[in-house]
Image (cartoon, grey):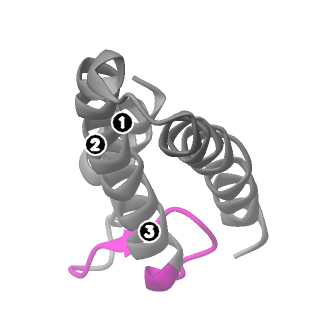
Amino acid sequence: MFSIVIFGCIANEGYINRPNEVEEFCIFNRNQNACNYGVFMGSLAFLCCLAFLALDVYFPQISSVKDRKKAVLADVGVSGEPFTFGEANLVYF
């Protein structure tokens, strides 16, 4: 759900223009790459969420303990660190 909030906020309200300027610019330090990065990370997080939701549905049918362990470690690894680190880096753009 957080990925949808990030994507929606940046896509809808992340670009503004001043009254004396015609071109819109990103609200994150007027850096276009910062808005692109935020939209990309939000979209990627949403797609990963859908993939792991499908994995959770399929999980009871996995009989191998090694495959279950890989699935759980992938879920923990992807859901925790990369997106937290990535969204925190948005502040430094």
Q: What residue does disc 2 label?
A: 51
Bounds of the magenta segment:
22-33
What residue type is disc 2 on? Ala
Whether residue 80 is in magenta: the answer is: no
Residue 30 position (above or below residue 62): below
Q: Position of residue 74 (x, y in %)?
A: 57, 48
Instruction: Give the mark nearest the N terminus, 1 or 3.
Output: 3
Disc 2 element: helix
Q: Would you say 79 lies left or right of 7 here?
A: right
Label 1 to label 3, Cα distance in Å? Answer: 26 Å
Disc 3 element: helix
Residue 59 placement: quadrant: top left
Residue at left offset 58%, top offset 35%: 72
Question: Foreground residue, 25 or 58?
Answer: 58
C-beta proximity under 8 Å, tags 2 and 1? yes
Classify the position of the C terminus by image quarter: bottom right
Q: Main secondary structure of the magenta part?
A: loop
Instruction: Give the mark nearest the N terminus, 2 or 3.
Output: 3
For the residue carrying disc 3, how many other residues have a C-alpha within 10 Å: few (<14), some (14-19), or many (20+)? many
Residue 67 position (above or below residue 16): above
- Mark 2 or 3: in front is 2
